[in-house]
Amino acid sequence: MTRLWIIARIAATLFLVASSHCLPPPATASAVVNLTLTPVAPTLQSVSTTGCRNHPGGGKCPEFAPCCLNGYCSDDPRYCSIGCEAQNSWKETSCFPPAYCSNIREEFDNPRLANVTTFNGNPNEYDLTTDYNADSVVVQDSKLKITMKLDGKLNAYGRPQGLGSVVSTTRFMQYGKVTARMKTGSSSPGVVSAFIIRNEDPGDEIDFEIVGRDPTEAQTNFYYRTPPDMPTNLIDYNNTGKESLNTNTAAGFHEYEIEWMPDYLLWKVDGKVVRSVFKNETKDDIDLITGAPVVDPLTGKHVKKYPSTPAKIQFGIWDGGQGSEGTGAWAGTPTNWSKPGQTYEVQVDSLDIQCFYQGNETVTWPPKGYGPTKTHSGPYFTPGLDGGWSLEADDVLKDEKTPTMAPYVPFYKNANLMIPTACLLGIALIAIAIVQVTKRRRLKQVRWQ
């Protein structure tokens, strides 16, 4: 009887401990133990260099979930692909390297287009991704169509604003020639249609932008080292060109071409050069601390403020007329949203990419030595990714508030699995103890009889 009493007391203690932990975690619980977290949208702040900011243990991501994306850790291949924070991951090689350029001729009959939230990072499977608001991107009549419609919420300035989308190549180009035959959607003041070559880090960009204030004018521009978190007072906005095309770009298709070479840049429309820039004529890069020109250690020459790092090719449409006063003055304002169901649409009829550096079409993915060293078969938990996010004018990110789950952790570290298991074990032990006690009592009664 003494043994049974000890077992019963132990079981009761386990039950009390387990039941105290079987309650739902509080709203402030760690992302590891709360599987009903609201997704966190990517922010435009600088990436932390001290660790993956939402990793509950602090520091870099662990080996079992090695890739840091939007402040979360996972071994989902998507986390190791676009936007992966190499310095905050298990190893820098946990993140896939940029996929380098290969020649593409796309007529949009059957394009290899993926939603970025389901893209596994393999450029051998997809050529293009829809980076946000995928419902606004369709392929129809052998054309890529990117639509902007009125968003259901007021923007940060208290104004109704259109929500468009961006389509990007999965590969990065470092010099080459890109030609797109497209019709802009800039038929109203404020509507901005964009064809650009851009990277987020370090922030080089070359672009064609057609603004609704004057759809007969092509705006050309280039930027040097302007990441999203860079203060606007440090950005050089003086590299803009304005070229009159003497035709309404929203009324029909025209051929736009960017020829980006190590020593020069050309912008062309319908085969005609509308602007040229030579590297040796651009400004010197200046060290912000010393104020002296930056010198290339390999050549001994001054580094020029000329875009030179691998970048993606992108198409997009966004509403500048309802944004800040400065943006509205540039794009035209206000954007006309007076008609019910009003939409604006960029159409791309063809895309041709000719790489300066070639020979990357058959590289296996990921390259040897990159990606997670340990993987599991799923499911993958992906906060801030499956939840979706979108980009508004003036680079303001907003959360689309789609339910999602917390990052992947192994069973033995997952409180949401271990706690219920402890509950069940405690209840099972109590049940066993009760059964044993009942049997003993019955046997005792039988013996006395």
Image (cartoon, rainbow, N blue to C red):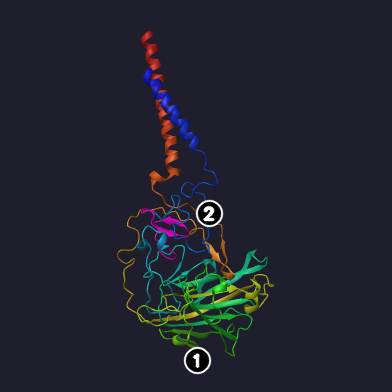
x and y percent of residue 148 in the render?
59, 71
The residue furthest front is 290
Q: Main secondary structure of the magenta part?
A: loop
Disc number lying in front (1 or 2): 1
The disc label shown at residue 403, or none: 2
Residue with the mark numbered 1: 272
Instruction: Count neighbours of disc 1 (C-alpha within 10 A) and say few if under 14, some if 14 to 19, many if 20 or more.
Output: few
Instruction: Count neighbours of disc 2 (C-alpha within 10 A) and say few if under 14, some if 14 to 19, many if 20 or more.
Output: some
Q: Is residue 133 above or below residue 258?
A: above
Query: What amino acid type should be assigned to the residue bearing mark 1?
Result: Lys
Could you tell whether 333 is left or right of 72 in the image? right
Query: What amino acid type should be assigned to the residue bearing mark 2?
Result: Pro
Q: Secondary structure at mark 2?
A: loop
Q: Secondary structure at mark 1?
A: strand
Q: Is residue 165 visible?
A: yes
The residue furthest right is 338
Could you tell whether 322 is left or right of 166 in the image? right
Q: Based on the displayed image, in which of its 4 quarters is residue 88 positioned?
A: bottom left
